[in-house]
Image: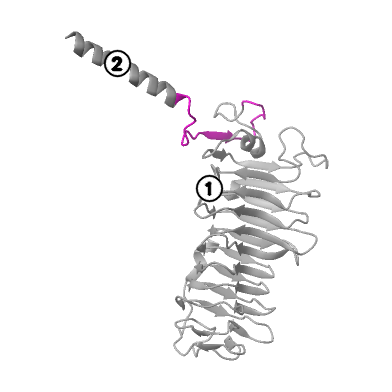
Amino acid sequence: MRKYAAIKLTTLLASLVAGLACSLIPTPGWSTTLHVENWGVDSPTCGTSTAPCRSIGKASSLSMFGDTILVGPGRYSNDLDGDSVYDEPGEEPANGLTLSNVTVKSTHGAAATRIEYGGNFSASAVIYGIGITFGVRNHGFTVVFQQSVLNVLRVIYNPTYPVVGNILYVFSPSPGVDAITAAIVRDNRVTAGSPGAIYDGIQLAGFVDVVVAERNAVVGALFGLKGPSIAPNKIRHNVALENGYGFRMDGDVANFTSNIAIANSAATGVYLNPGSAVTGPFEGNTLVGNGGVGNCGLFNDSGSSVIAKKNFWGAATGPGADPGDLSCSGVGSSTDSTLFLTAPVAGGLGALQ
């Protein structure tokens, strides 16, 4: 009996010591939600539902790995009172918002949640994220940007964390701005608010094995949606409207299906850059009114052969002169578009809803 009691006491003590040791080791996964509201107040302890922060930047500074920043409806800006004095209480960081390893989403969606940035920037991006999810479908943000910078929304180290459900308006006074740079981009809308404001509407960043763009819409950029050179692209159900190039693929295309390219007049609806290749289906796309003088819905300059089947080229008779779009190929390239659709398909119209 005494022996049993001694063994039981020893086991209990060992369990207590192990529990104490574990309690001293930081454990990943203890994530929490930090709240941001227009009625909140920035403080060293803000972020609860009853005492929210006023700025996303303050909540970010208080966040830890895996946390969620939940943003209420209203206006968030680096100059809330319009006095050209930045970093005042409650304002977003003057030279951009840096986020790391968190999920940022709104409670009421992009239409009700607006992030505004103006002023002169020393940073390379307005919103810079490292391993973050920015926006969730129906819980994204409207981002309005009015100055020169390299990127409006840039997310890196992003093999699984997407940019989703956001609306970006870019009013840059000079060209060269990339609106969204990320590896996974879904359900976003990008609009150039002034001529030449956007260089790349969506630039798929090729630092992971696969990059994906789905259900996005881009209007008025030089390149509506541009794929990277070092990863296979999955481009599905997107809309490129009134850009210079609708889509430009610099690397391998694993899937280019059900996209819409309309009135991209400076060059072509879809451009396959030299060195790229189509390794999967290129079909179900609607290509109408593209190419300006060249009239090319697709310009295959990859140096390889492409089977572009079951696409709609702007006319029931297939690729051809206006009102149709041509299927064009550069030197050393060939395109088979003999099997075509006689009417447009819904394709990426979901991106406009």
Q: Residues within 10 Å of mark 2 (few under 14, many from 20)?
A: few
Q: Nearer the viewer, residue 286 or 200?
A: 200
Q: Nearer the viewer, residue 135 or 191?
A: 135
Residue 189, above or below 65? below
Q: Residues within 10 Å of mark 1 (few under 14, many from 20)?
A: many
Horizontal and vertical percent position of residue 245: 65, 74
Residue 275, above or below 39? below
Looking at this view, name the residue that lies furthest to the right. 84
Majority secondary structure of the magenta segment? loop
Identify the secondary structure beneath mark 1: loop
User: Dividing the image into 4 quarters, which one contains the N terminus?
Assistant: top left
Q: Residue at x 68, y 67 (%)?
A: 221
Q: Amino acid at mark 1?
A: His
Q: Nearer the viewer, residue 16 or 87?
A: 16
Horizontal and vertical percent position of residue 35: 57, 34
Q: Tell me the magenta residue range.
A: 23-45
Taking the magenta stretch, the answer to whether it contains residue 181 is no
Horizontal and vertical percent position of residue 226: 61, 68
Q: Which residue is mark 1?
A: 139
Identify the secondary structure beneath mark 2: helix
The answer to whether residue 28 is left or right of residue 217 is left
The dot on residue 10 is 2
Q: Amino acid at mark 2?
A: Thr
Horizontal and vertical percent position of residue 43: 66, 27
Looking at this view, name the residue that lies furthest to the top. 2
Residue 60, above or below 124? above
N-term-proximal mark, 1 vs 2: 2
